[in-house]
Amino acid sequence: MAAAAFLGASRAAPALLLPSRGLPRRLLVSAASSSSSSGAAGGVVEFQGKVGFLGLGIMGAPMASNLIKAGCDVTVWNRTKSKCDPLLSLGAKYEPSPAGVASSCDVTFAMLADPQSAAEVACGANGAAEGLAPGKGYVDVSTVDGATSKLIGEHITSTGASFLEAPVSGSKKPAEDGLLIFLTAGDESLYKRVAPLLDVMGKSRFYLGDVGNGAAMKLVVNMVMGSMMVSFSEGLLLSEKVGLDPNTLVEVISQGAISAPMFSLKGPSMVKAAYPTAFPLKHQQKDLRLALALAESVSQPIPTVAAANELYKAAKSLGLADHDFSAVIEALKAKVENSQQ
């Protein structure tokens, strides 16, 4: 569901294959409704104007940092001001409210934790919308449901500003390395305008048409990811239970058809019961909840996801909400312990 405090009140566009403008090309995506990425890291960012960034958590901080390091004029805001300090030391400016950031910048990005926060920061008191005007742009890179994204878009465009939703696929390390994938939808001219900035923060970008399509794509991607992690966890535990070395399982999987970076990166830590946070478990469960609501809205059964969601909820009840989402394996361990009592 969309953010309750603010909710009272298609067809995808053709592919955009943008030129690299002389910058080294990282990745060419030729699939329908996508664009190329031009990899501006280390080069001159061809964006004229000031950039705002709202939300400096596990994802927002490295994204904003990459913009600053690329030479962008960046102004930041975060509810907890101390999180702005590392960015200020890199040369960022500070404004005490989202409205102040939006007012002082040509384009403002927002990376918030959930639909409620995204709506409040954009539409609430001293929110970004209060600082926007014609000619300005607002790019929401948070993961929210389509209804919330459309609500935010309506508030933003009512000021005369342009709106683009651009949720990202990728976690902490890709954010740090500028290797995120942007799933954008909304104002096409704003998409083209901020493309150089997206290329600083990411390795590829897709333009998907109308607002809501980016949110839907992100939820489907994270739905698959969350379910994969549950199945992988079951495999690790079963391999150990029957006398196999789970580390060998990780290696076998990494060399076969179901190889995935997620398994290779997280498997060794999971075997050691260590879950350093790259993508918080509470956010994975939130995305599964939103994906279930999306599926319900179109009468699409997703029983595997429903079962996975229950395990993530169980892991949260064990106090693992702020651990990496791979900690869902602990919920499976707890089920075994409970069955043996």
Image: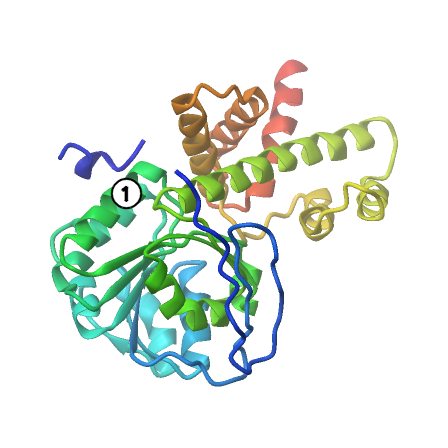
Q: Secondary structure at mark 1?
A: helix
* Residue at 20 percent of width and 66 percent of height: 102
- State the image coordinates of residue 114 (x, y, percent, origin top left): 35, 44
Badge 1 local density, few (<14 within 10 Å), some, or many (20+)?
some
Residue 98: % across, % down: 20, 62
Q: Is residue 290 above or below residue 272?
A: above
Q: Residue at 41% of width from left, 29% of height from top? A: 294
Q: Nearer the viewer, residue 191 or 260?
A: 191
Q: Give the residue at x 56% y 50%.
A: 32
Q: Foreground: 185 or 277?
A: 185
Residue at 16 percent across and 57 percent down: it is 129
Give the residue pinned by disc 1: 150
Relative side of 47 to 273, left or right? left
Task: Decide if residue 54 is in sight here.
Answer: no
On screen, residue 247 above or below 168: above
Q: Is there any visible trace of residue 249 in the rendered image?
A: yes
User: Horizontal and vertical percent for residue 324?
Assistant: 55, 46
> Viewed as shown, does residue 188 lie left or right of 244?
left
Q: How many marks?
A: 1
| Residue 43 on image: x %, y % | 52, 84
Location of the C terminus by quadrant is top right
